[in-house]
Image: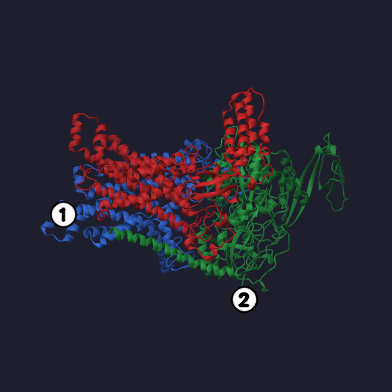
Chain colours: A green, B red, C blue
Amino acid sequence: MFRTFLAALGLGLVASILAFTVGSERVLAASQEASESGTEHPVGPGRVPADDFREEILREGRATSVEPVRGGRLVVHIPTRPLHLNRVIEAGADARRILEEVHARLVERNMETWELEPSLAESIETYDRLTYEAEDGRDAREMLGHVTIPEPGHGWMFNRLPVPGQRPESHYVMAKDAHRLGLSTVFDFRLRQDALWHDGHRFDADDVIFTLDTYLNEAVQSEHARHLFEGIRSYEALDEFTVRVEFEKSYFLVLEIFEDDFAILPSHLFDLLDEDNERFDADATPEERAAFIHENPHNVNWIGLGPYRVTEFTDQYLEAERFDDYFDEANGGYADELRWRFIPSDNAAKQALLAGELDFFGRLRSRELLGEFTAQPAFREQYDKGFYYSPQFNFVAWNLRRPLFQDQRARRALAHTFDWQEFIDTIGSKMGEAVTAAWYRFSPAYDAELAHFPYSLERAEELLAEAGWIDRDGDGVLDREGARFEFEFLFNKNDAAVRLIGQKLKENLERIGIVMNMAERDFASVQALIGDREFDATGGSLFLGPEVDPVGIWHSKGADVLRSKNLTGYSDAESDRLIEAIQTELDNDKRTALFHELQARIYDAQPMLFGCMFPVKFAVSKRTRGVQRFYLDPGYSLRRWFILPDSDR
Amino acid sequence: MADRLGPRRALRFAFVLLMFLYGTAVFAPLLASDLPLTMVASNERAFFRALRTLPIVVEEAEAKLGEGGDSEASVRAVRLRFDELQRGLEGERHLQVEELRQAFEMLVSDPSASGSVAERTAQLRETLGLEGAGLEDSKLVAVRSYPVFASLTPLDAFWMASFFALLFAPFCLPRRAGPWLLGSTLLITLSVGASSSFGRADLLSGLKADMTSGDVRVESALFVPVPFGFAETHLDEGFLPPSWARTEEQARNDSIDVRAGEPALDSLQRHWLGTDALGRDVLSRLLHGGRLSLAVGLLAALIVCVLGVVLGTAAGMFGGWVDLCFLRLVEIVQSFPAFLLILAGVAFIPSGTLHPAITIAIVIGVVGWTEIARLVRAELLRLRELELATAARALGIPPLRIAFRHLLPLALPPVLVAAAFATSGAVLTESAISFLGFGIGPPVPSWGGLIAVERDASVWWLQLFPGLFVFLTVLAFNLLGEGLRGSLRAGSGGASAMGGAE
Amino acid sequence: MYRFVLRRLGLLIPTLFGISVLVFALMHLVPGDPAAMVGAEADGAVAANVDATAQIEGFRRRYLFDQPLWKQYLHYVGPFSLASDGHEWFGGTGRDPWNGLLVLDLGSEFLRPQVDVGSELLRRLAITLPLTALAILLAYLLSIPLGIYSAVKSGSVFDKSSAAFVFAMYALPTFWIGLLLQWAFGRTGLDWLPTIGLTSPDAAELEGGARLMDRAAHLVLPVACYAVGSLAYLSRQMRVGMIEVLGEDYVRMARAKGLSEYTVVSKHAFRNSLLPLVTLFATVLPALVGGSIVVETVFDIPGMGLYVYESLLRREYNAIMAAVLIGSLTTVAGLLASDVLYAWIDPRIRLSGRRTDG
């Protein structure tokens, strides 16, 4: 009996192993078949080349010149269900993707040229407001106009806004009196008059004013964005369709704020003080107004201004129907319905993909993109694949507050210890970019000429020896004054890329005598520990925007503040000066030059082991057309997609 | 099942299986390593590094000696370097270094003497005629070394020795000592094994890479059967299927560089069980992972037994409110979320103070002692009523003594059985914890952790084999438990449990 | 008997409070709080442009995370709310004065304030319970006859092979068998059964019968996975117990009396061999409610196990406390139930008044 048991066990094991190898061979064989016909590098759905920054609109690559047709339903995958669509009280990224089609903004960024273009605001006029106070209190003036500085170091020329019926007026303020000048920037937003909310109500200045009130209302849970609007000195509605907002200083990201962070709420549904509101209450306190916003059912039953109107919002999906009264008909979408499916598990989403239930899935891994998953018939028959870059990158950061990393020579030595290109070539299957700055690789602010320090362990060893790090006691670990070069690398266990980077880095460092202990924790622990600066080195990924204000991460004012974005503790006076200059510089070219300078400076100091970025790898269904990839988040624009009628497939 | 098998057979089978698993775990460094067992080679890299850093340490040493401070560490550093240099040289060059060394030693013994060695050491390279020399013509002496053995820690050696003891024990020791022997060897091995370290940061770390690049010129080297380290990455060999399941194309991928001591690209010996995401050999990681899983399992079982026996005895012997507290404690512990405790333990106890393996073992132990405790308590309640106990009480022997000296030995057999099952349970739990991602961090492998990284069906080898090993381990301990149960209960149950192991 | 039950129920309250204090303390010892999750992207990336400091501070103030632990605990237990809009006696505005355990309010999630913990738990339970109940039922239904039959036919081929098979099953790790089942029966293998989740993605659009079939198909693999371990254990217990009982004197007496094997087994032996299974009930009840994190992870089932796991990762203190309290409640209830059943089945125990198993 004993023998039978052994035999059975053995047979069972052999059988299962055989089964899997045979099975896997089948799959492998299929993939080989497929890869022969494929390209060695999938560039988009086979129809469009990668777009370059600031070049013309992508050309439709497929030979057909099919005209866009209306109709059908597009189903897009989103990993997490947003709680609601009111971005004033919540800062999640998933809601933003949906709101892209379901809502509109004052200004919108052109996906191809990255310029901010008017949308709900037909036009925007910018002036400066000058307040000038004379020594004796007399001669105080206040006027709107434009400031020019004819020559630096000399006085300011102020040209008042032309007023009909009056002569143009200019004033000259001497440099020595500059301290008596107050200068603020004024934006006049002239709103469209034909924009309608999805319930038919007209969009007007009241909505904008109310939204500004809401952001600044302390009782509203809008802390994530409030600081962006705290630089506003005043705002008012000049008439039914004009809003004037005055900022205390000029700031290069002001319009960006109105593009990305300013989510307009319909005052007739959210504002207790709006007479059109059903629940109008003239004596509402700010707390009551806040509570009304927080608990408003329209957070979920969203009424927006975009080309698509939300019809259903369940646990599984959000569905939106095309809104035919959208103000920009040419850009109003072709598909009749858009559905965003919430599938948190990637495995389940991939199953849905293979079953043909999704039109777009953006979470493929590079192994799947180039491997069996996309080679199987179920995939190939229904989908095309591709990738695009989104503003996100992986990094390793040193804690400059720790004695080990205070020495810049040591940090620069460490910069030679990781071969980013090899990492990208192997783990990323050659899809990725090595980056040298904490801003978007494909933005003008990024200096692509700045080269990485070359990968050389010998050079690292030399530099460390120069800094005094030698293995004196022969135990294999570098030491200096009795201290070993040993530190702990803290990271989020769920971050796959950083995990791999960490392990490879550890191996490399061990070869030159540095011990790096890996400490993986769950996300909340990592955030808490980083916030309290209880780490030696950490790794993670940063999500950027097209333009980034470097003040959060690189300015010294955050270096000693717990839980600020300046996790490395970087503090450099010259960098501070550059950052402050960037913040107020409105000229694009000059600002770009400043960014490049700052990038070089920061890279030189090596507070981070600057890293790499991996693209988003997606699958899009074959029946869709008009799919273009952009370098801006979310990387695609659903309203341009249309579904090919069966006859044309 | 053991009844069918016969307790003897079950025990034997369990023994064989356990020895196999145990053996592979204990001897993992000798079975799978990127270091050779022995080699005759000249380490150019170390040599030139020593040459380069010698002036610096000499200068430091002289400064220290001059000040009159504690110069022992600096002097030792210098001596180390001289050793390294002399090791690689012979003949006249050896003498030249010797001369310099003597000069230095004179300075050490008499710091006030004049003369500085530092300058001469800076020119040593020139003196030896190695100025501008490439590595190829430096003509260093090749020496024999035993890298693998040098990388073993004393604990590793102890674990290996104890393995042999365990292996031959059944043949050497009297039969009746069986369960006790098992118990005590479990005790020894787990306390030792659990504290084995995985780190091995010494100059040997980059040895294989140096051998491949020629920085270490090898005349002959003997590698271990699986010449891959468990943390050794081959980035371009990621996700390679097992060698016997590979397709033609995968086998002929020329862009992969074959490092020193590794089998050829198309050979069957290259990655028997495939590789993981970073190109690390799965078999090597499995073997090393066994150390961790077994150690955690055994340590947890020990804690479970100790806690269970102590608390159960207390409750059983004293009764009354002690018993009441015990029962409430059992309730609390049983309903406590083990996971929270693990999270807290791993997060809260920094990995410096306590090896995460020990933390996890402690947590599993603290959460799992209830069953054994209740068992012991039940047994004691029963045994208390026996004449033996009544008599002892009448004699005035203190209750604790009665418990530990007289009653507990009778209650032990079921405890041993439960201990075997506790071990298998602990191994299962540890692998489940690692699977969920809360086990020991990288790069230390653990069986559950190997599975967790990739759950895609296309990389089946990453899940099949670790799971198989867990299965075999658990099976082995279960068989052990069954065998013990059968053999210890042979004859009537109860008081004469100890009589006749067969 | 009633006094015994009542006394045990009375001890429940202090036990629960003890557990709540312990778990509360432990939860807060772990670094991080829900505020850490605020302002983070879904995949853990940190947004460079967003300065969430003010938001995090506001979040902390709102939910009392900046208060000392004992105050937070008191706020959790209630009945007074110590929040800024809580009871007036403690400085609140009085808008929402009552909350906490003592008023049976389990709170709501911090990161999703409109989700009430109690109702979320019920929802998750509705997913987990069918799964675990089916699995345990299956395990019991299969193991009892299997155990009895192989005990009765002790020594036969059936007994030997089933014993071996069951023994091997017992050693299988749950996650491994889950993965293997997925491969064997899923898309990569025979493709007979769905392997992810409890429903097909488009289940909402199926009508009654088809939907039921879909649900049933999704349940097969998780239930099998879950039942494997318990089945093995139970049948072994059953068999061992049965063999022991069949060797007892009174059974031999019954046989000697000339009663048929069937009567002997079913009338005399069966009842007594059930005893070990009854004591297992204590562990069954919490497992029923708690679900299995491993099975739910492997099959992507959003049940109770996964909920507790995710809550731990997101530091949803209210959810964790609620789940733990429910868990301990069921554990204690299970222990009590098994004691009562044990006493009921074995008259000896009842009569002698002594319990050999607390």
For the residue pair A170 and B313, the one nearer the viewer reads as B313
Q: Quadrant of the N terminus of chain C?
A: top left
Please provide percent x and percent y for residue A449: 73, 52
**Residue C304, numbered circle:** none
For the residue pair A102 and B336, the one nearer the viewer reads as B336
Relative to residue B58, is residue B228 drawn left or right? left
Q: Quadrant of the C terminus of chain C?
A: top left
The amino acid at mark 1 is: Val
Q: Can residue C79 be spotted in the picture?
A: no
Please provide percent x and percent y for residue A245: 72, 49
Please provide percent x and percent y for residue B158: 41, 40
Relative to residue A66, is residue A502 drawn left or right? left
For the residue pair A375 and B20, the one nearer the viewer reads as B20
Disc 1 crowd rating (10 Å Cα; few below 14, some 14-19, many 20+) is: some
**Residue C251, numbered circle:** 1
Relative to residue B325, is residue A114 drawn left or right? right
**Residue A648, numbered circle:** 2
